[in-house]
Image (spheres, grey):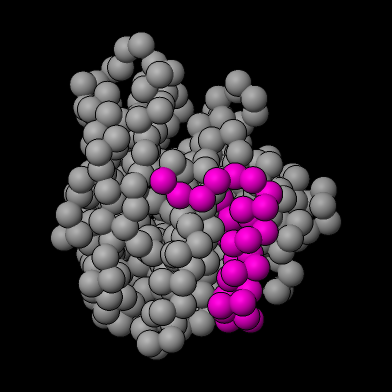
Amino acid sequence: MADKVIISCAVTGSIHTPTMTPHLPITPDEIATDSVAAAEAGAAILHLHARDPETGRPTPDEGVFMEFLPRIKQQTDAVVNITTGGGHGMTIEERLQAPMRASPEMCSLNMGSMNFGLFPMLDRYKEFQHPWERTHLENSRDFIFKNTFADIERILKDLGEGHGTRFEFECYDVGHLYTLAHFLDRGLVKPPLFVQTIFGILGGIGTDHGDVQHMRRTANRLFGDQYRWSILAAGRHQMPLCTYGAIMGANVRVGLEDSIYLGKGELAPSNAAQVAKIRRILEDLSLEIASPAEARAMLSLKGGDMVTF
C-alpha cells in the first residue's frame, strides 16, 4: 500500500473565475456532481471550496458548504478535505466557518503568509462576466495571504485537537517546510504528515525540475519517514510536474482549482477528465492508485463516520 499513489482533486478553489471557463463548478449542485464524478474517476481525496451560486465569487458561508457536503458523502466514499485558506480577503474566522461546522477528516493548511499574485491573468481577458472578477485579480497585486504562526496554532488547536481533523500541509516555498518542521518539533502536528508541495504560484517557488528536487530533498531531510509527499502545479505545469513528481515517489493533486486545462489550449471539460488523465498516466507508469480506504490508512484519518455532515 505504501507504493500506491493518492490522487487528490481540488474541485473549484478560489483562484479561477467564471469568465475563464464555462466548466468551473459554481453552484452547490455543480460542485457535488463534479466531486462525485472525480471520485468515480479515481480521486481518493476531494479538496473543496464554496462559491456564491449567483456570481461565482468564493464564499466562506457554511450554509453553502452544507448544500453540497452531505450529497458528496452520500454518493462517494472519498475523503472530504475542506479549505482553511478560503479566498483572498477572508478573515480567519470566516475561513474556519465551514470546517468547524463540518468537522471533516482533512483540511488544507497553508504553512505561512505570502504574496499570492493572480494579477498576470488580467492580460488574458478583455471582458469579465462579473465586476468582482477583475477586482479579485487586480487586488492580488497588493495582497498578502495571511497565515501567521498564531493563525496556524489556532487552526491546529481548534480543528486538529478539537475535531480530530488532519491536514494537507500546503507548502508554497522551502521556508514553509521549515515552518512545518517547527510545529513538528513542538509536537503540535503528528506524523504521518501529508505534505503538499505547490509549484508555479506567483509569490512561491517556481516550476523547474530543480525546484521539485530541492523541495523533495529538504522534506526528506526534515521529515524522514514521517511524511507522505504530494505535488501540485499551477496551470500548464499541472500534468508534467505531477508526472515528474510521481516518478520520484509523490502522490498527486489535480483539479480545476489548480488548472483549467486538460492539454495545451484545451479547456478541461470537468474535474473528472483531469483525474482520468493523471490516472491513465500513473497506470502507464505501472503505479497503482490508492482507494479512499487506503488513503485513510496511509494518512491516519479518523474516518468518514466521524464527520458532522
Q: Is 118 part of what is drawn in magenta?
A: no
Q: Nearer the viewer, residue 177 or 267?
A: 177
Q: Which residues are magenta?
A: 203-232
**Up-down relation of residue 96 to residue 256 (above or below):** below
**Up-down relation of residue 62 to residue 181 (above or below):** above
Identify the residue at horizontal 71%, vertical 56% (top origin). Answer: 246
Give the quarter of the image for residue 31.
top left
Give the quarter of the image for residue 264.
top right
Identify the residue at horizontal 41%, vertical 26% (top origin). Answer: 121
- Answer whether residue 75 is visible to the viewer in this image: no
**Up-down relation of residue 139 to residue 48 (above or below):** above
Q: Give the percent coordinates (x, y) of residue 197.
A: 53, 58
Q: Nearer the viewer, residue 262 or 88?
A: 88
Q: Nearer the viewer, residue 143 or 134?
A: 143
Identify the residue at horizontal 62%, vertical 53% (top origin). Answer: 211
Q: Is 217 part of what is drawn in magenta?
A: yes
Q: Give the percent coordinates (x, y) of residue 281.
A: 75, 45
For the N terminus, the image quarter is: bottom right
Identify the residue at horizontal 28%, vertical 61% (top origin). Answer: 147
